[in-house]
Image (cartoon, helix red, strand yellow):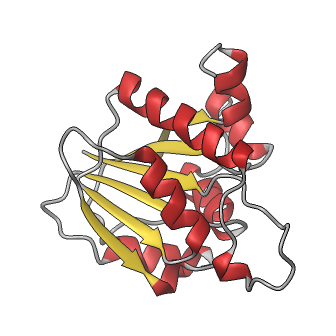
């Protein structure tokens, strides 16, 4: 069994219209929500072996907010993850070594949400699946169990374990 965590970058700023999209930093709310997600991940024992991260500034800053790790994962910044569609995201995951048990992919919507919905497949009915179906807000995390190899990852090929959003963490008192 493998673990896949999909994390959408935290909330970024639009204050400087002259900045290219790729260079937008996190805003104060994004930094707070990323810190809450870091604590939630620690509390749940979610520690990746490998982190695949888009090279956009907001995804890299989200990753920084999750650090330091107890056991430092291999971090792979990838240009191909910037605004990637589900097929491109899956292709990046297909390239993960079979010896890797846990991957955190930090990326962007709509591709991340579409990939998560595809992996979860139709049906479900669990609270996590209902939450995921409603959207994938900034700073949200979807955790999947993947029974097969990374190469075989496909539609319906993951079991959604949990779906966490910054709003859920705030409501639970983790602010």
Residue extending farthest top? 173
Does residue 132 sit above or below 10 in this rendering?
above
Determine the image quadrant of residue 116: bottom right
Residue extending farthest left? 99
Q: Residue at x 74, y 30 (%)?
A: 167
Q: Position of residue 30 (x, y in %)?
A: 68, 48
Figure disc tally = 0
Q: Which of 2 and 14 lies nearest the eye of the viewer?
A: 14
Does residue 36 sit above or below 174 in this rendering?
below
Q: Residue at x 60, y 34 (%)?
A: 164
Asked if one can make out residue 47 in the rendered structure from this viewpoint, the answer is yes
Does residue 95 sit above or below 119 in this rendering?
below
Quarter holding the C terminus? Answer: top right
Q: Position of residue 125 (x, y in %)?
A: 68, 30
Q: Residue at x 59, y 36 (%)?
A: 163
Determine the image quadrant of residue 84: bottom right
Asked if one can make out residue 107 in the rendered structure from this viewpoint, the answer is no
Quarter holding the N terminus? Answer: top left
Q: Position of residue 90 (x, y in %)?
A: 46, 73
Using residue 146 as the reference point, say whether residue 35 is left or right of it: right
Using residue 175 as the reference point, say whether residue 53 is left or right of it: left
Q: Residue at x 38, y 67 (%)?
A: 52
Q: Position of residue 123 (x, y in %)?
A: 67, 41
Using residue 28 as the reference point, say whether residue 37 is left or right of it: left
């Amino acid at each position: 069994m493998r673990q896949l965590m999909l994390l959408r970058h935290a909330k970024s700023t639009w204050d400087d219209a002259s900045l290219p999209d790729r260079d937008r930093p996190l805003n104060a709310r994004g930094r707070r929500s990323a810190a809450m997600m870091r604590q939630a991940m620690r509390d749940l024992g979610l520690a990746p072996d490998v982190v695949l991260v888009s090279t956009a500034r907001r995804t890299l800053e989200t990753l920084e907010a999750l650090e330091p790790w107890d056991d430092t994962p291999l971090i792979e910044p990838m240009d191909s993850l910037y605004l990637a569609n589900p097929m491109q995201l899956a292709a990046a995951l297909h390239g993960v070594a079979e010896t890797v048990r846990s991957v955190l992919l930090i990326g962007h919507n709509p591709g991340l949400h579409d990939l998560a919905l595809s992996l979860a497949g139709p049906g479900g009915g669990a609270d996590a699946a209902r939450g995921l179906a409603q959207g994938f807000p900034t700073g949200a995390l979807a955790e999947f169990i993947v029974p097969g190899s990374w190469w075989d990852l496909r539609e319906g090929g993951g079991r959604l374990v949990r779906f966490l959003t910054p709003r859920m963490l705030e409501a639970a008192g983790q602010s």
